[in-house]
Image (cartoon, rainbow, N blue to C red):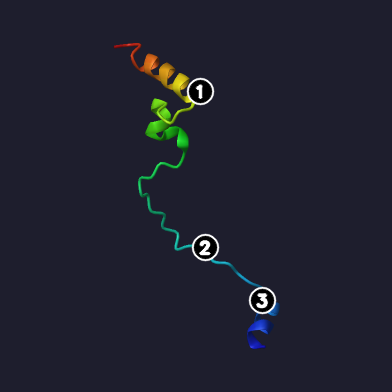
Amino acid sequence: MDDFQNILENGISFRGSSGTKKDDGKVKTKAKKKKYITGAHGSGSAKQKAKYRQQRANRHK
């Protein structure tokens, strides 16, 4: 009953993590993954976007 009484009096406090975020280099969004950029995953709109990206990349070469 002591723990239960303590919770009733003080409430529950949820502590966050230690505060150190590790950057593991993972890509968080699908739009930045190579398959989506090149249109290789099969979607017609992705292939169209990949074509436009390629045209834009070759514009000033």
Amino acid type, mark 1: Ser
Q: Which amino acid, by three-letter code, is at mark 2? A: Gly
Q: Nearer the viewer, mark 1 or mark 2?
A: 1
Distance from Cα at disc 1 to Cα at disc 2: 41 Å
Q: Amino acid at mark 3?
A: Asn
Q: Residue at x 60, y 69 (%)?
A: 13
* Residue 38 versus residue 51 in the image, above or below: below
Residue 33, by quadrant, is top left
Tell me how far mark 3 sits from mark 1, CA to CA. Answer: 55 Å
Residue drawn 36% across the image and 49% down it: 24
Residue at 65 percent across and 88 percent down: it is 2
Kind of element beneath mark 1: helix
Residue 37: assigned label: none
Q: Farthest front residue?
A: 42
Cα distance between the residues tagged 2 and 3: 18 Å
Say few, some or many: other residues with alpha carbon within 10 Å of mark 3 (under 14 / 14 to 19 / 20 or more): few
Which residue is most to the top?
Answer: 60
In the image, residue 3 above or below residue 61: below
* Mark 1: few/some/many CA within 10 Å (<14, 14-19, 20+): few
Q: Nearer the viewer, mark 2 or mark 3?
A: 2
Q: Which residue is mark 1?
A: 45
| Quarter of the image that includes the C terminus | top left
Q: Residue at x 45, y 59 (%)?
A: 19
Q: Is residue 31 above or below residue 5?
A: above
Locate the N terminus and report the quarter of the image it occupies: bottom right
In the foreground, 56 or 9: 56
State the SS at label 3: helix
Pointer 1 and pointer 2: residues touching (CB < 8 Å)? no
Q: Which residue is mark 3?
A: 10
Q: Which residue is mark 2?
A: 16
